[in-house]
Amino acid sequence: MNFEEYQKKSRATAKYPNADENYIYPTLGLTGESGEVAEKIKKVLRDKAGKIDEIDREEIKKELGDVLWYLTQLASELKISLEEVATSNLTKLYDRMERGTLSGSGDNR
């Protein structure tokens, strides 16, 4: 499956208030689901000395799927394709790599 197909198929499941006119709902969902990923990783560090087993991997994969869904809905709300997001991100990262600025901080390095 490619980004375009995922974006189109996942949009059919966007059953939230004012879909197509509501970027706030997927933004809040994205932050919540990202927090759930972080929480699962935290518990692996706390309870399993950082060793991720297959059960952890599957649970984290489910949460990453939720992150992907909300990210996709936010992009759709903003009329941005995931393909555009991915391409733009790689362009930025390769430019930083070529200039030796992958490390550091700030959006415009």
Image (cartoon, rainbow, N blue to C red):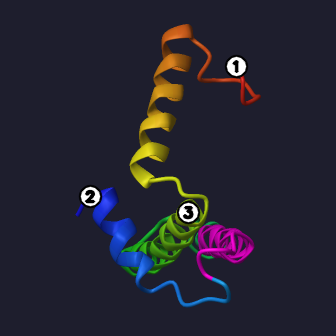
Q: Residue 50 carries which label?
A: 3
Q: Which of marks 2 and 3 is nearer the N terminus?
A: 2
Q: Where is residue 85 in the image (x, y as percent from the top left)?
A: 49, 46
Whichever of labels 1 and 3 marks the residue nearer the N terminus, that label is 3
Magenta-colored span? 19-43
Residue at 58% x, 71% y is 44
Which residue bears the numbered disc 1?
109
Residue sitting at x 72%, y 23%: 108
Q: Nearer the viewer, mark 1 or mark 3?
A: 1
Residue type at the position of mark 1 = Arg
| Residue 34 on image: x %, y % | 64, 68
- Mark 2 neighbour class, 10 Å CA radius: few under 14, some 14 to 19, many 20 or more: few
| Number of numbered labels in the structure image | 3
Is residue 56 covered in magenta?
A: no
- Main SS type for the magenta part? helix
Residue 49 vs residue 65: left or right? right
**Left or right of 32 in this view: 65:** left
Asked whether the beta carbons under mark 2 and mark 3 sit within 8 Å of each other, the answer is no
At label 3, which amino acid type do we have? Answer: Gly
Q: Which residue is drawn at 60% across and 81% down?
A: 19
Percent across and percent down for residue 65 are 45, 73
Callout 1: helix, strand or loop? loop
Q: Name the residue under label 2.
A: 2
In the rendered image, residue 95, in percent from the top left (x then y), is placed at 51, 18
Residue lying at the far left in this picture: please name it. 1
